Amino acid sequence: MPVLFALFSAVLAAGCASLGSTRESHETLVGAWIVTASRPAGVGKNLLTFSSDGTFFRSGDTHPVLSGGHGAWKHAGKEFDATYIAFRFDQSGKWIGSTKTRIHIIPGPGLNEFTGVAKVSTRDLQDNETATSETRLEGKRIQVEPF
């Protein structure tokens, strides 16, 4: 039992130490975000998760005609750039191409918020660009709420 308690204590301490200061947590995208996208076709919602290794994942309200997205992100000065790719499907579920989305993210105005712009390139099965669009983004960090 003492070994289990010591292990639990070490894990808890390491977890608390990895949280860092409040200031540090707001200077990075690492974490989960709910994002409002003001698209040409109307307002939508996405979930973005940015990992510390520079990868990120996107899911959104466009399922089943757009898959989840996989991408990468990096610092661009005090701002961030990201790119992801998702597969496109028609209403019957047939694969018809992909989208490549480039995102520029500006932290703020609040500590757990960002604004941004997404430039979307719609692509066919041969990876030829067939259309483009631009979307405004507003993100809010998903935080743990009391139980």
Image (cartoon, rainbow, N blue to C red):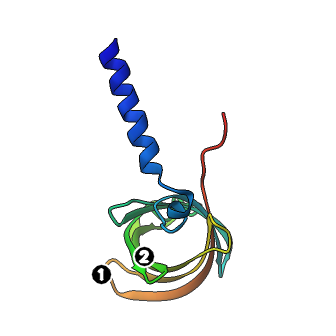
Question: Is the residue 18 above or below the residue 112 in the image?
Answer: above
| Front-lying residue, 90 or 123 | 123
| Front-lying residue, 133 or 140 | 140
Q: Quadrant of the C terminus?
A: top right
Tags 2 and 1 touching, CB below 8 Å:
no
Q: Residues within 10 Å of mark 1 (few under 14, many from 20)?
A: few
Q: Quadrant of the N terminus?
A: top left
Which residue matches tag 1?
126
Question: Is the residue 24 above or below the residue 108 in the image?
Answer: above
Task: Please indicate whether residue 58 sits to the left or right of residue 97 in the image.
Answer: right
Per the rendering, the mark at residue 44 is none
Please tell me how many numbered marks the rendered image carries: 2
Q: Residue lying furthest top in this view?
A: 1
Mark 2 and mark 1: Cα distance apart in space: 23 Å
Q: Residues within 10 Å of mark 2 (few under 14, many from 20)?
A: many
- Residue 51's x, y, as percent? 39, 59
Residue 99 visible, this angle: no
Task: Please indicate whether residue 87 sits to the left or right of residue 62 in the image.
Answer: left
Looking at the image, which residue is at 65% across and 82% down? 40
- Residue 14's x, y, as percent? 38, 41
Per the rendering, the mark at residue 82 is 2
In what element is the residue under mark 2? strand
In what element is the residue under mark 1? loop
Task: Please indicate whether residue 107 sits to the left or right of residue 16 in the image.
Answer: right
Looking at the image, which residue is at 43% across and 46% down? 17
Kindly identify the amino acid type of the residue bearing the numbered disc 1: Gln
Task: Please indicate whether residue 53 sits to the left or right of residue 142 in the image.
Answer: left
Kindly identify the amino acid type of the residue bearing the numbered disc 2: Ala
Please tell me whether mark 2 or mark 1 is closer to you in this view: 2
Mark 2 or mark 1, earlier in chain:
2
Looking at the image, which residue is at 57% across and 85% down? 134
In the figure, residue 55 lies in which quadrant?
A: bottom left
